[in-house]
Image (cartoon, grey):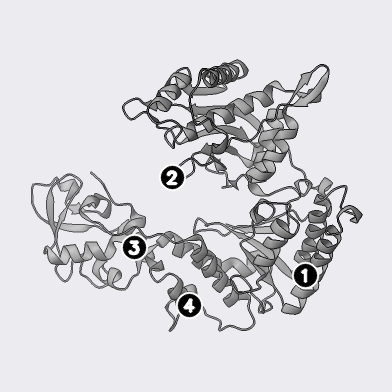
Amino acid sequence: MSKFAYNKIGQYGHEVLAHIEKNKGVLKAIDGIDYTIDISRNSTYAKSGGFKEQVNNNQFAELESWLKKNQFEVVSPHTRDKKFEKLGWTEIEKSVFSSKTLKISTAQQENITLLIIKNVLGDDTQTWKSFDDMFHAKNSEIQKIFPELPKLTEWWANFELQFNEIAKIGKFPNSSYGVYLYDDPGNFMDYISNLVTKDLNLYTKKDSWNPADIWLIKSNVIKQQYIAKFDAIKEELDKGDKSKYVADRYQAIRDINFHLKEAYAKKDIVGISLKKSDGKRLHYTEFNLQTNAEKQKLPDVKFKSISLNCSYDKMNNQFTSKTSQVFVDDGPRGAYKLGFKSNTGMGIGNITYEFLPDAPASAFLGKVPKDQLKLWLVEQIKTLKKGVLQSENIQMPQGINLNTEWSKEYETEWDTKVAFIKKQFKIPSELTAISLDNFVENLKDSYLYGGLSEKNSSMMQMVEFVWILAKLRANKKHGSNNLILFLTLAYYYAQKKGQKYNFGPFAKVY
């Protein structure tokens, strides 16, 4: 049994319509029975404004709501219970159909939003009255980007909301942005990305500093004025030992952030991070725009518990779990979970870290930039040797650091790590661990039947990450709680929030 969700009407609508026409109203239901629905002129299916007409007109957003209130009349068989004499959309057997999965890429999402902003705020484009008019216009640029957008009702609602609300929530001056450089040669996105990752060599990815997907710039003249200031910072840094930044290279990024805050305040340059909305309300939140870092209050999160799943499939010699979580609480902001999980790519890669909501009121936060967290971690985990704190050289888990072959020494190392985890966290109140006691035995088995591979590499990294959390809890340097410090840091890193962490100014639209 496989049933439709209402938001799949756009993806499957035309195929279901063709099936009904071809089979003269016959549809298989999730109870396994073939029902014949009424397809006469006045039926729910064929009447004016009915199912057939709305599908043919690609009115999927309207149809999604309509189907929640309207069902197909059943002509036969008559044996169906009177309570179920009609057939609803969610009662149709989905497995009969095979429509391709529709998915809009990140680049397509960003470019559609860019066109919306150009329409609403630009001074050199035709202005449309609605997103529907804009999409269905002759030679529509949005249709060129993603012609099947009406079939994705949730994304359609998202873009319609952006069209209606973006100018109001951002308090942007209307018709004032003449330059929208995003994917053209020499665009500001490329410039600022290259500046922080290559020219300044301070970040491996631009998003580890500022997650803005789109940069709004009032004019080319204004852009060049600010670029001149940024270039001067780069030239100073290039002086090497004679540079004023020699003692603290990150002062360069703080100076760049200062100029970007100045530009944002004047609405000269505005960086915007885009997230999918709920289609009902568009949120606009500004980050890292305080006068100084001290005025930005960033309270610690509260550690709640860890869920670690080490389930193992002995038949296929592989670990089955792909994700584990650390649960935290941020008071009025809500409950969250730091998911650490295998990468979606094949082969031996690195696990990823992402903060997700763990309560209905909580908002999506984002991925944790590992490059900056790794730098902090090396400095924090130290051990006392001969009265001196020395680094244990512990790093964020990486596939490249895992042993390619099993050995008695490697087995002892993992036994020690598992024992240390169990010592530092109370079970089950602080640590829920499935099959942790059998982890080393199963790991040995996985190596015996395949060595280091995608079947065990992610699981090893997940267990090692929990071991690192245990090391942080055990290492209370100068009386501080390094576990809380680490989780708080990861929490704000995921949001790219915190001037004291050198994150740049931006606005998030979601």
**Callouts 2 and 4 close, C-beta under 8 Å:** no
Residue 21 at x, y percent in the picture: 15, 67
Which is closer to the viewer, label 2 or label 4?
2
Which is closer to the viewer, label 2 or label 1?
2
Mark 2 = which residue? 346
Q: What residue type is disc 3 on? A: Gly
194 displayed left or right of 24: right
**Callouts 1 and 4 close, C-beta under 8 Å:** no
Label 1, residues with CA under 10 Å away: few <14, some 14-19, many ≥20? some
**What whole-number distance in Å separates the C-alpha atoms at marks 1 and 3?**
45 Å
**What whole-number distance in Å separates the C-alpha atoms at marks 2 and 3?**
31 Å
475 displayed left or right of 130: right
Relative depth, front residue between 47 and 131 = 131
**What whole-number distance in Å separates the C-alpha atoms at marks 2 and 1?**
40 Å
Q: Quadrant of residue 448?
A: top left
74 displayed left or right of 211: left
Disc assigned to residue 10: 3
Q: What residue type is disc 4 on? A: Glu
**Callouts 2 and 1 close, C-beta under 8 Å:** no
**What whole-number distance in Å separates the C-alpha atoms at marks 2 and 4?**
35 Å
Quadrant the C terminus occupies: bottom right
Residue 308 at x, y percent in the picture: 50, 28
Mark 4 = which residue? 141
196 displayed left or right of 57: right
Mark 1 = which residue? 227
Which is closer to the viewer, label 1 or label 3?
1
